[in-house]
Image (cartoon, helix red, strand yellow):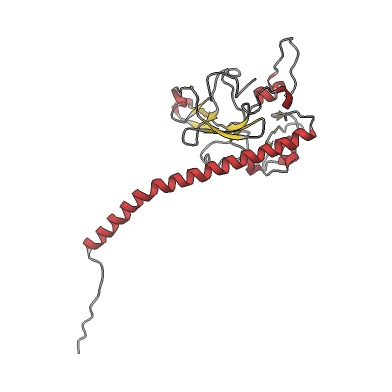
């Protein structure tokens, strides 16, 4: 006897309709998922900066209210450089970081998730994430730049009491560097927060990566989000959103 088996399945038209519906739903949902991710990254970044603010308070209490040095050469031994995030060795040694060893904070406290590892070339000759926050060493660590006061005397590291408006002066902020040698763009992290006046030359490092805004920790321990505030993005820095908050050093970069 011959048995006839009836097989059920989707027709080609039905499959095309299902695919079209899935594609439509994806188009509708994707922007919402992207916004949710951006919001989560922003919250994590802000929490990192606030925790760094707590570590800053601990450092001040143990170091006569002074801010920490940005760079220590030949430390802990000859040929090794220790930045505020740790040594330029593989692996990075955070126990030599003046800030992190005081606050017992992990290196990940210095990472903003909106600029994830793999999207930039690391500084410092290391092969692991270090930080994508820039330290305002131009203002807070003048000896690093050989800065002198009006009397021609070498300046010392700033103390909290030296800052007129601590709620506005940046200590850390979202930062990055951009180079285009031979027309090929290279994104790097930046441990230095460039002032508007520039150091040797004006190279903006404040990174407005949170939907056109940059997060920053101020000297009073507060963290907030800032727009360009009058600064116009231009040249090679326009598309990568590198610039400054405002058009003068005061009050965010130097006082």
Residue 150 at x, y percent in the picture: 71, 10
The reply to whether residue 116 is in sight is no
Residue at image point 60% right, 17% down: 200
Residue 203 at x, y percent in the picture: 54, 22
Residue at image point 60% right, 22% down: 251
Give the quadrant of residue 102.
top right
Residue 213 at x, y percent in the picture: 50, 33
The relative height of residue 97 versus residue 9 in the rendered view (above or below) is: above
The reply to whether residue 4 is in sight is yes
Report how many numbered discs are placed on residues in the image: 0
Give the quadrant of residue 5.
bottom left
Looking at the picture, tell me which residue is in the foreground, 83 or 18. Answer: 18
Q: Where's the N terminus, which quadrant?
A: bottom left
Looking at the picture, tell me which residue is in the foreground, 87 or 64. Answer: 64
Q: Is residue 96 left or right of residue 37?
A: right
Looking at the picture, tell me which residue is in the foreground, 159 or 99. Answer: 159
Residue 246 at x, y percent in the picture: 53, 22
Q: Where's the C terminus, which quadrant?
A: top right
Q: Residue furthest top?
A: 151
Residue at image point 41% right, 47% down: 32
């Amino acid at each position: 006897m011959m048995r006839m088996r009836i097989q059920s399945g989707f027709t080609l038209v039905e499959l095309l309709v299902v695919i079209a519906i899935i594609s439509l739903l994806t188009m509708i949902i994707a922007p919402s998922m992207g916004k949710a991710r951006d919001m989560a990254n922003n919250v994590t970044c802000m929490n990192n900066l606030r925790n760094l603010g707590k570590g800053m308070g601990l450092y001040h209490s143990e170091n006569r209210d002074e801010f920490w040095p940005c760079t220590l050469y030949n430390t802990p031994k000859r040929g090794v450089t220790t930045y505020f995030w740790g040594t330029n060795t593989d692996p990075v040694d955070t126990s030599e970081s003046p800030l992190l060893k005081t606050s017992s904070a992990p290196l990940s406290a210095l990472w903003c998730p909106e600029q994830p590892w793999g999207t930039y070339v690391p500084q410092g000759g290391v092969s692991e994430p270090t930080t994508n926050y820039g330290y305002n060493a131009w203002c807070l660590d003048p000896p690093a730049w050989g800065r002198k006061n009006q009397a021609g005397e070498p300046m010392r590291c700033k103390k909290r009491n030296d800052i007129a408006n601590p709620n506005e002066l940046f200590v850390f902020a979202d930062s990055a560097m951009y180079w285009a040698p031979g027309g090929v763009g290279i994104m790097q992290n930046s441990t230095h927060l460039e002032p508007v006046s520039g150091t040797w030359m004006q190279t903006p490092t404040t990174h407005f990566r949170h939907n056109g805004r940059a997060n920053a920790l101020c000297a009073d321990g507060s963290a907030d989000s800032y727009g360009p505030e009058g600064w116009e993005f231009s040249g090679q820095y326009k598309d990568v959103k590198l610039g400054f908050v405002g058009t003068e050093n005061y009050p965010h970069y130097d006082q």
